[in-house]
Amino acid sequence: MIELKTPSEIEAMRPAGRFVADVLTALKEKAAVGVNLLELDELAHDMIRRAGATSCYIDYHPSFGASPFGKVLCTSVNDAVLHGLPHDYALEDGDLLSVDFAVSVNGWVADSALSVVVGTPREEDLEVIAATEEALVKGIEAAVVGNKIGDIAAAIGAVASEHGWGVNTDFGGHGVGRTMHGEPHIPNAGRAGRGLPLRPGLVIAIEPWFMLGTDRIYTDPDGWTLRSQDGSRGAHSEHTIAVTHDGPIVLTARD
Ligand code: MG
C-alpha cells in the first residue's frame, strides 16, 4: 500500500532528514586513509545516541539478510556496492567508499547515501560517483506531480546509458515513512510515462547506484555485503524526497 503524507507530516519528517544529512556530512569529513570502517560506524552510533534517534539498520533482518545487521551504517568499499557490513578494515589510499544511513526521529524515517574516494582518486571512480550524483539530481527533477514512477526510473537509467553502463534493478528506490522500506519500488532504469502516477505527499528514497563494469552482483560470505560480480567498483547516491504541489522537497539535503 502506498501512503501519502499530509503537508504537516512532511514537515514532521524534516528533523529526521536534517539529522541524516548531518551524520553523512560528519562521515564524509571523517573518511580518510587509515580510518577504520568500525570507527565510521561508531561515529554514526554516537551521533544517534546523542540525538535520541533510532537506527533503522541495527535490528534489520529482512529475508535476504543472514542475521540482524548489527551496525548502524552501511560501508561499501570498492567492489562492494551496496549493504556493506562495517568490519575491521582501515581505508587505503584510493578506496571508493559508499556510506548509506537511515534512522527514525520522532517516528519518521530518513534515508540517504553518498560516495567518496579517500586519498588519491582514480579517474573512473570520480566518473562513477559523479554519474550517480547526476542521476540523483535528474531523478529528483522528474519527481513532480503529473509524472510517473517510470519517469524517475528513465531519468536515472539514461545517465548510466550515457556512460555505457548497464543498470542492476534488483535494488532501487522505495517509499519512506514510519518504516524504511515501503511501496512503491523505484527501479534505476525503466520507461518514461509508465507506472504509478506521482501524487503530492508521496515520500520516497531515490537511490541510483552504478557499477563500472558488470550489472551483476553477488552476496559476500558475510551474508550482507553485495559485490560486483567482476570486481569492478561502484558508487551510490541517495536522498529522501517529498513530492509536493510546489515540486520535490529534498528532506536529506546537505549544506
Ligand atoms: Mg539508503
Image: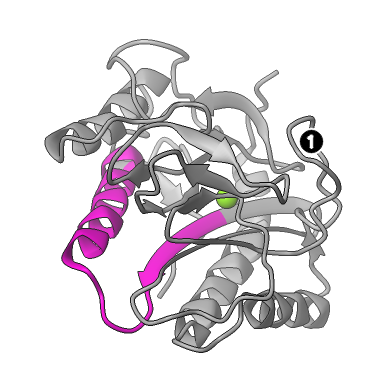
How far across and how far down the image is residue 198, in percent? Answer: 44, 23
Report the side of 144 relative to 69 (left or right).
Answer: left
How far across and how far down the image is residue 6, in percent? Answer: 64, 37
Q: Which residues are magenta?
A: 112-140
Q: Nearer the viewer, residue 119 or 16?
A: 119
Identify whether 249 is placed above or below 229. below
Q: Nearer the viewer, residue 21 or 147?
A: 21
Q: Which residue is mark 1?
A: 62
Q: Is residue 36 visible?
A: yes
Q: Residue at x 37, y 34 (%)?
A: 143
Q: Residue at x 47, y 14 (%)?
A: 196
Outermost residue, top direction? 194
How far across and how far down the image is residue 34, in percent? Answer: 51, 89
Identify whether 162 is placed above or below 57. above
Identified by mark 1, the residue type is Pro
Report the side of 223 relative to 169 (left or right).
Answer: right
Report the side of 201 relative to 234 (left or right).
Answer: right
Q: Residue at x 28, y 46 (%)?
A: 212
Quarter of the rendering occupied by the N terminus? top right
